[in-house]
Amino acid sequence: MKPPRSSKNDVFLRYKLWLSAVSGEGIIGEDKYKLLRTIEEKGSLKAAAEDMGVSYRKAWGDIKKSEELLGYELTEKHRGGVGGGKSDLTSKAKNILEAYDALHRKMDNAIEDAYEDFKDKIK
Amino acid sequence: MKPPRSSKNDVFLRYKLWLSAVSGEGIIGEDKYKLLRTIEEKGSLKAAAEDMGVSYRKAWGDIKKSEELLGYELTEKHRGGVGGGKSDLTSKAKNILEAYDALHRKMDNAIEDAYEDFKDKIK
DNA sequence: GTTCGATATGCAACTATTTTCATATCGCCT
DNA sequence: AGGCGATATGAAAATAGTTGCATATCGAAC
């Protein structure tokens, strides 16, 4: 998420967008988005977790939970072989990331428009 | 925040909007918004905390922290007197809540528009 | 068939967040 | 003056969230 420009009061407006299960549990939000993108880039969950400064254990658990909630896989997991193993995104995961991007662009525009207003009102 | 309508996959799209300090600390988000509205309604921090199912200690600490970050008061605190004391919102707090509402309405519209798109893409 | 490194997973250790508790202060009301 | 109940605040106790560790499995490559 890009940091919106600051007001002179040193206050930003920020937002988060996420896919949620009916249970209220978050499925994909900022963090999962980033994690998936990093897996895509690095080719492995381990490298992605390291890159994000989070434990492998957590990253792994997070992906697993999201997959359970969605009812389908976000990553194709490969154990053994070259490099010990790897993870790739499924096409469904790629679709979600793409849709998430588009949504964010729209939200960014909306918030941009609304921001000026807001700034004036809270002065 | 109103729960956006569900897709047939039992997945919602949700978002949170908040005012953030440059430090990255949240100043006013969903929870603080609700807390302030409840203080406004109930007339006391204690009643508001109970109403929200959160400890008085936490509610009090949260308000205090927000006020420190903003550099001004969100509530007028009164100890003693009728009922033991009370808390009212300052006019600045009211302005913020109002601006927050307006922003939410705009974001709701934006997300509403974007949602159909999203739904199709992640199918 | 042995080695290598990532995935897979339970569990203990640790950190961060919240609640609970204890105690003090304040000001209207009787 | 004394009681009542909310605000004020620190400190300990309890929860929740993460990390670290240990151990197992897998499969390509040598």
Image (tube, coloured by chain):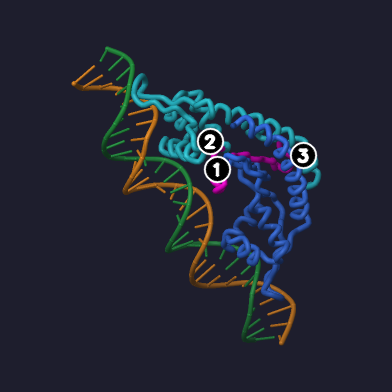
Chain colours: A blue, B cyan, C green, D orange
Instruction: Judge whether B115 appears above or below A51 on screen.
Output: above
Specify whether disc 1 shares its chain with disc 3. Answer: yes
Instruction: Judge whether A11 appears above or below B34 on screen.
Output: below
Left or right of A68? Residue B8 is: right
Q: Position of residue B28 (x, y in %)?
A: 55, 37
C-alpha gap between disc 1 and disc 3:
26 Å
Residue furthest to the front? A8
Residue B54 is marked as: none
Asked whether residue A54 is in view, the answer is yes
* Nearer the observer, A64 or A42: A42
Left or right of A27? Residue C11 is: left
Q: Amino acid at mark 3?
A: Ala
Task: Give the image quarter of residue C9.
Answer: bottom right
Specify whether disc 2 shares its chain with disc 3. Answer: yes
Q: Amino acid at mark 2?
A: Lys
Q: Which residue is mark 3?
A: B114
Q: Position of residue C26 (x, y in %)?
A: 31, 27
Q: Which residue is mark 1?
A: B26
Specify whether residue A58 is painted magenta.
Answer: no
Question: In terms of sequence position, does the residue under pointer 2 or pointer 3 come before the other?
Answer: 2
Of labels 2 and 3, the one closer to you: 2
Residue B32 is marked as: 2
Left or right of B57? Residue A84 is: right
